[in-house]
Image (cartoon, grey):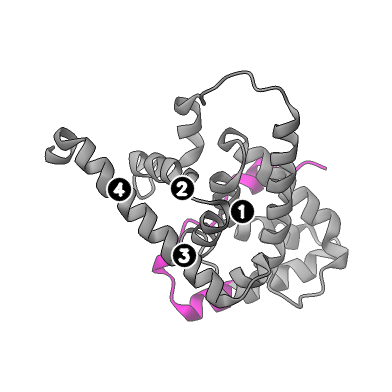
Amino acid sequence: MVISPAVSVAYDETPHAARTSDEKTYADESTTAWALAARGGDPAAVEHFVRALHRDVRTYVTYLGADPQAADDLAQDTFLRALGSLHRFEGRSSARTWLLSIARRAVIDSYRHASARPRLADTDDWQTVAEFAQPRGRLGFEEGIALAELLEALPDERREAFVLTQLVGLPYAEAAELGDCPVGTVRSRVARARSSLIKSLREAERADPVGAAA
C-alpha cells in the first residue's frame, strides 16, 4: 500500500499556537470522525484523515527519530501501519492520540533498526538533516535547524514531552496518556526541557557574540 503523494504532502498549515481551544477540539473531533469513517474503506475519509494529521506526525517523528533524514519514511510508515489497523480503532481516544502512539512505535522500531546497523560515519550530514528539520517558509529555517540540534541534547522523555505539547500541540492529558505517565510528570518534563533549551540558547549567544550583535 502506498500513500498518494498528493495526500501525503498536503497537510494543515495552521500553526497550533494560533488555534483556539474550540478549534483544536473541533479538529480532533473531525479527524476522529474521519478515522471512524475510513474503517469502512471510504477513500475520501482516508484522504481527509491523512491530510489532517500528516503535519503532526511528521513534526513528531522528525524531532524524535533516530535519523531526521528518514522523517518522511517514518511518517509514511506510521500511516501505513495506521491504515492497516483502522479496523481496530474504536474512537475511545482521539484519532490524533491513537496515530501518535503508532508513530511512537515506529520511532522506537527505527532506533532498534539503526542500532543494529554498522555506523558508517561519526557525524551527521547536517546540510541534509536541515532539509528535514524545518520546512522553508515556516517560523524560520535557521531557527528550526537550531531547535532540532538543541532538542537532540535533551533526555528522551523530556524531548518527547516538549515536542508533543509545544510543537505538535497535544494537550497535557493526552501527552500523559501517550507516554503512560501522570499529567504532572509531563508538565515537569516540559518545564525542565524549556529551562534546558533557554539555558542552551543563552550559552550559544554568549559563545557567538558576533552573531548576537548582528
Q: Are marks 3 and 4 in contact (CB under 8 Å)?
A: no
Q: Quadrant of the C terminus?
A: top left
**Cα–Cα span, label 2 and label 1:** 17 Å
Q: Is 89 on the left-hand or right-hand side of 17? A: right
Q: Are marks 2 and 3 in contact (CB under 8 Å)?
A: no
Q: Are marks 2 and 1 in contact (CB under 8 Å)?
A: no
Q: Which residue is mark 1?
A: 57
User: Upstream in the sequence, badge 2 or badge 3?
Assistant: 2
Q: Circle 3 sits in a helix, a strand or a loop, which is it?
A: helix
Q: Which residue is mark 3?
A: 190
- Name, please, the residue furthest toward the bottom: 22
Give the residues in magenta. 1-27
Magenta stretch containing residue 19, yes or no? yes
Q: Is 212 on the left-hand or right-hand side of 91? A: left
> Which amino acid type is marked by label 4?
Leu
User: Residue 88, how many percent across, how many down?
Assistant: 87, 67
x 45%, y 26%: residue: 127
- Asked if residue 152 is positioned above or below residue 38 in the image, the reply reads above
> Which amino acid type is marked by label 3?
Val
User: Upstream in the sequence, badge 2 or badge 1?
Assistant: 1
Q: Circle 1 sits in a helix, a strand or a loop, which is it?
A: helix
Q: Quadrant of the N terminus?
A: top right
**Cα–Cα span, label 3 and label 4:** 16 Å
**Cα–Cα span, label 2 and label 3:** 12 Å
Mark sitting on residue 151? 2
Q: Nearer the viewer, mark 3 or mark 1?
A: 3
- Asked if residue 5 is positioned above or below residue 159 in the image, the reply reads above
